[in-house]
Amino acid sequence: MKIFLDGKTIDLNTFFLILDNLKRNKLRIILDKKSLKKINTEFDYVKRALEEGKSVYGLNTGLGGNLNYSLSKEEISNFQLQIIEGRAVGSGNYLNENLGLMTLLTRCIQSSRGGTGVSPQLYKFMIDCFSKGFDPAIPEFGSIGAGDLTQNASFGLSLLGRGKIWDKGKIKSSKIKLKSELLNIPKIDGKDAMVLVNHSCLSIALSAQALNETKTCLMMHQLSSLMSIEAFSANHQIFLPDINHLRNSPGQKECADWYYKILKPLKRQGRRIQDPLSFRTVAVMIGLAKSNLKHTISIWENELNGITDSPVIIDDRKFLSTPNFHNPGLAISIESLLLSNTMTANGSVQRMQRLMDERVSDLPKYLSPVGGKSAGFVSTQKTAASVLVEIKQYSLPIAFDASPVSESVEDMSTMTPACAKKLLQQSKLMKLIAGMECLVASQALDLRYNNVKTTDKVSSLTKNIWKQVRKTIDKIDDDRPMNDDINNCTFLLEEFVTNGKIEKLFKI
């Protein structure tokens, strides 16, 4: 794969395609001549501004609460490294492997657009590091979303051979890794320290990872809900276009159309005139979550393809401070997505319980074929409820919770990294709920239609997943431990979504 760093828009799918091709040693990065010329011109202006003694934030002034301090000429030469070292106060465990690599890719993409004032040597060095799979280890805590300064400092020190990196699942010295890859550390010059630390690339990388996981988990929920609908023998008329096109609710029409096209060939009547709301409103709930995801991805792509530095160089000849490190649009959109995901997960838990309730499902109590003293699937309700309460916990908003810092100079914050981490953790739990619903629905399908190989009363998509489940997980005939069954079904459903054959069915 060839990728041209020429300032053109890169979307979320391409972002992960770049990372995937890098891992498979199939990536070639081509530097754009116009971008390089712009970077050189802007760096020349940085040097002239310093020589002329112009007051430039972060070059010859202090940062934050020290803004009014003017550096002497003797102090300027050492100040760039001091900026990075003095702000490397991130703490906690290191963020997941590949997060630093994603941050580095984001920094390369933004720097290619110009305006950052990066030196040509640092720009090329960052691209060389990315091409070698250099993965800075970044502490878990530190950023309030105002430029990710403290965690970016660890990112910057890693690139300068003074920090840590991930290497094949282990934390190692970045200096040793740079030396082994024959990567020569450049002298940071001009505005390079600010280029390394004062940006939102960590927020963007964390959000990318979370959004990609959410995309997968919502696909899983769409599949597990389809299986429950068919296992419940729900009324398919609720997905009729005539009904769902009556109002323009976010994602409802598209999601209902998806179910309708799959279920229409069956030409079956539901058992009831009206089903429980967790079945009747599934297109509304999942449609909203998908709509929120799509909106959040569009905001994320604006952040990736913008410049989140401050100050920036405009027209190759003047420095201006910006508010572009402040990303409330991304943070608030993630918060909205967390809330709609919680509604989706709750619907999943309710459908599981309705399938186990013989009064509404017309299936054996707790989906137990033997009845009597058998617990069947009833205990899974407790597990589902315990997972759901943590999903709800992650949906509690934090993006408006400002904690003034730096003598109240930074008196507003978005908490975007924390929002992204919430979404990432919630997505993992959402997958588990979807896997549980898939397992429960498979049992219900067994009890209603008996034989997956011979029945013609379910859709081909549901039948395909049901078959995959039964290849590795036996039907529950009598009480047995199901913890491995739940985990295996979750893995199986996720694999079904991510194998590349199913994604065309989901327009996210």
Image (cartoon, grey):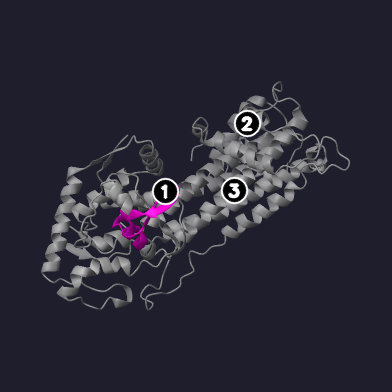
Q: Nearer the viewer, mark 2 or mark 1?
A: 1
**Residue drawn at (26%, 66%) of the image:** 81
Residue found at x 49% / y 56%: 421
Reply above or below: 279 against 47: above
290 or 24, nearer to the observer? 24
Crowding at dot 3, Cα within 10 Å, few <14 / some 14-19 / many 20+, comes out as many
Give the SS element for disc 3: helix
Would you say residue 166 sits in the magenta stretch? yes
Residue 249, visible in the rendered structure: no
Q: Which span is picked out in magenta?
A: 152-175
Most extreme residue toward the top is: 454
The residue that label 1 is drawn on is 98
Q: Residue 428 placed where, x, y %?
A: 56, 49
Q: Using the image, determine if residue 13 lies above or below residue 397.
A: above
Q: Mark 2 Cα within 10 Å, few/some/many (few <14, many 20+)?
A: some
Q: Are marks 2 and 3 in contact (CB under 8 Å)?
A: no
Q: Is residue 206 magenta?
A: no
What type is the residue that disc 2 sits on? Ile
- Name the foreground residue: 136 vs 474: 136
Query: Which residue bears the numbered disc 2?
Result: 465
Q: The residue under label 1 is which amino acid type? A: Asn
- Identified at 50% across, 46% down, the residue is 213
Marks 2 and 3, how far apart at CA: 18 Å
The residue carrying mark 3 is 430
Residue 470 visible in the current orientation: yes
User: How far is mark 3 from mark 1, CA to CA?
Assistant: 22 Å
- Residue 409 position by quadrant: bottom left
Residue 422 relative to residue 361: left or right: left
Rendered image quadrant of residue 415 = bottom left
Circle nearer the N terminus (2, 1): 1
